[in-house]
Amino acid sequence: MKIALIGYGKMGHMIEQIALERGHEIVCKIDIDNPDDFDTPEFESADVAIEFTNPMAAYDNYLKAFKHHVKVVSGSTGWMKDHKADVEALCKDGKNTLFWASNYSVGMAIFEAVNKYLAKIMNGFKQYEVDMVETHHIHKLDAPSGTAITLAEEIVENLDRKSDWKLGTTVWDDGRVEGSEEHKSEELLVNAIRHDEVPGIHTINYDSEADKITITHDAHSRKGFALGAVLAAEYTQNHTGLLTTSDLFKF
């Protein structure tokens, strides 16, 4: 498979390594220094482009790829608030193809399945209050993380006593504390921590007077995310429309 990389930072380098190990070819690498390379024959020859950039650039990158009829696998978060409806329309009926996920780790796909099942179980045990804490490196621009939002939405969808989620505090290594833990009882509180170079930790707590149940996904490195992105690209090569991990992993 011919792959184009959009974003060539730490994730881009790791995706390249894994893609080559799996027998794929990298035909184009686009970063902030060469944005005009979207309009090259090399980019247009790609079967799939894998995009890991930032919330401000992601949507425009999708449009540039779609212009050349290149399918996209993206792990960029933070763009959906403003552009979700636009992307859905662009991908309707397979006119364009975007595989998007907030987290490409295979372990996270399993964790999401456990999260949804546990939330359903907890409808029968109202004595447990639920909250979430996510921890990421100090360079992460958005809070809560896209993965935390996905997990929170899954809880809200499956736990009757929660109707929405709310960002609580964001705590930084330099002692800054932003936000407040004040929230309504029907809101799921999501607190964020920005610490060192942590790849990503997501912890969901169900706490009662008698005991506490905790589930955690702790990423040791970016390698799991990179492998998942390449697996998604392999899937996307032969599928169309708006895709996500629930299409790739059938739990």
Image (tube, grey):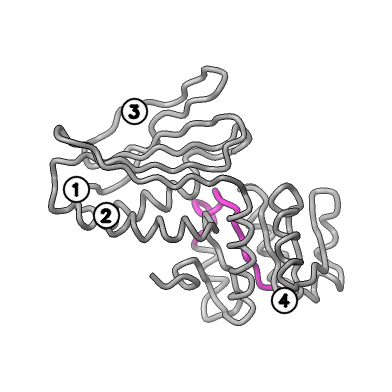
Mark 2 residue type: Leu
Q: Is residue 187 visible?
A: no
Badge 2 vs badge 3, beta-carbon distance below 8 Å: no
Dot 4 surroundings within 10 Å: few (below 14), some, or many (20 or more)?
A: many
**Which residue matches tag 1?**
161
User: Residue 26 versus residue 227: which sits nearer the camera?
Assistant: 227
- Residue closest to the far top: 175
Residue 118, how many percent across, how many down? 26, 54
Which quadrant is the C terminus positioned in? bottom left
Residue on which the image places disc 2: 118
Instruction: Give, as a three-letter code, the residue at label 4.
Output: Asp
Mark 2 vs mark 4: in front? 2
Q: Which residue is mark 3?
A: 181
Return the residue at label 4: 47
> For residue 32: magenta?
no
CA separation in Å, label 4 and label 3:
46 Å
